[in-house]
Image (cartoon, rainbow, N blue to C red):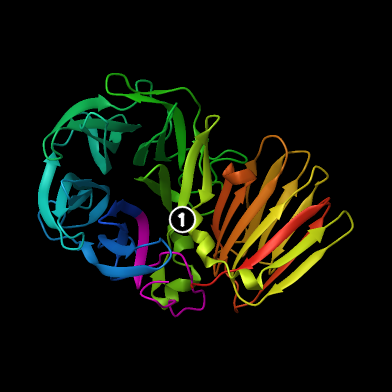
Amino acid sequence: MLDGKVKASEFPLLYHITPEEGLLNDPNGLVKFQGSYHVFYQLNPFGTVHKNKCWGHVVSEDMIHWKRLPIALAPSEYYDKDGVYSGSGIVKDGKLYLFYTGNVIVNEEERKSYQCAAVSSDGITFEKLGPVIEHPIGYTRHVRDPKVWQEEDGSYWMILGAQTEELTGDTLLYRSEDLLNWESCGSLLQDKPELGYMWECPDLLKFNESDCFLFSPQGLPAEEKRFLNTNQTGYLVGKFSQTDHFVSVSRFQELDHGFEFYAPQTFRDGERTLLYGWAAAMPASNEQCLPTIKEGWVHALTIPREVALIEDQLIQKPAVELKQLRVNEEQSTFSLDMAKEYRKTMAHAYAELVVTFSQHTKDFVINISDAFYLKHRYKEQEIIIERKNWETGQMEQRFGFYQGTLTDLTIYLDGSMIEIFINGGRLVFTSRYFVYGSQRELIITGELGAAEGIIYPLALQ
């Protein structure tokens, strides 16, 4: 929902951020400025292919009702003439600064990237300040996606996704006192894991005891049940310091196990950390077969998520503001025992399903209109999601594992989007699925023990 209306579509999304037309990808510049939430995003306003990248811009008081603003940044200068690529935002002295990567195509085989800044007093109109960092020695032109934050001592820090001349992924670290003059501090990580050939969209999440380095490595080889998407997103747990940089104490963990999730970015809102991701990143042939292509638009951002670090695991929960969508007077509750099957025809495709399980829960299947399946395998402590690929027509699966027992499950349905949160957000899946018509048929079968459920219809109120 943007500007008070749902996009006219066979597959409309009610409460996710979508482009008015064209192609949307990475969330950018997430920030709370002058009391409002600002979400920027990669946007091609002229078509559904990856070119002509600008920064789309929406603003909200509550992360539910969004107003579309004019494009914030568009190609216009020698340093960004072929695309204003991803970056971040930060507030200093009452002004909003945006940092982004300018893309310049020299020829078919060569391109240049520039790390640039822009500034605004009103959060709507931005003045470009040009490049603020020289290209680092020892790296290819694949250096991009600046993320900036401020430390408690007042200093500013930036990390950049990068590719070494040896064609391995890396993240570069910079320091500044004024956001405009930056000094190189080398690599963010002391010990760099061998994870792909390029690291995109780096982010550093600061918590009390430990920190998280969040990034999207390209080129991870697929395993039987991991790394099955085109590119992955995950994190390392460790600790950041200005002297030792980031020291990791964990292995790489995937953040989201669904079919469509990539390039997340976080920002601070008081005491909480909020995250948006891009609900896409797929092979080009699959992307061009998406049903909304014929309508002239494609892709969406995820719902806002509150993230926290618990026992070296990054937990994601739907932002509390999403409860405003619940139509409480129309909610329906249900109970399930060992012998029951539950069926519910939902009048529309916007709903929140919350299920609490008992110790007797075993294998079960949640079927949504024969288009999307969630399967629980009790002995394996495994969740499997399954859908039909819209390009090939073949069924495809993604996998996730949990520890301990299965306690709860929350599913957000929004037209052609589904986001699933298992065990309080310890296991998360984001995916698209496409069903013609406004109704959804929910069927739950299996050994559910004494499970209890609530279905909330969702609407803008």
Front in this rendered view, residue 77 or 73: 73
- Residue 398, how many percent across, how many down? 61, 49
The residue under label 1 is: 283
Magenta-colored stretch includes residue 16: yes
Query: Residue at the right extreme?
Result: 339
- Residue 461, how many percent across, how many down? 49, 73
- Residue 296, how many percent across, how many down? 38, 75
The part of the chain drawn in magenta is 1-26
Place residue 352 in its image quadrant.
bottom right
Q: Amino acid at mark 1?
A: Pro
Say whether residue 450 is visible. Answer: yes
Say whether residue 394 is visible. Answer: no
Number of disc labels: 1
Taken as a whole, is the magenta stretch helix, strand or loop? Answer: loop
Secondary structure beneath dot 1 equals loop
Q: Indicate left or right for 184 with 215 as reference.
A: left
User: Relative to 298, does residue 224 appear above or below in the rendering?
Assistant: above
Front in this rendered view, residue 371 or 290: 371
Residue under the image location 47 percent in, 43 percent down: 307
Residue under the image location 47 percent in, 39 percent down: 234
Q: Indicate left or right for 198 with 346 as reference.
A: left
Residue under the image location 58 percent in, 64 percent down: 413
User: Relative to 239, does residue 33 appear above or below in the rendering?
Assistant: below
Q: Residues within 10 Å of mark 1 (few under 14, many from 20)?
A: few
Residue under the image location 27 percent in, 41 percent down: 142
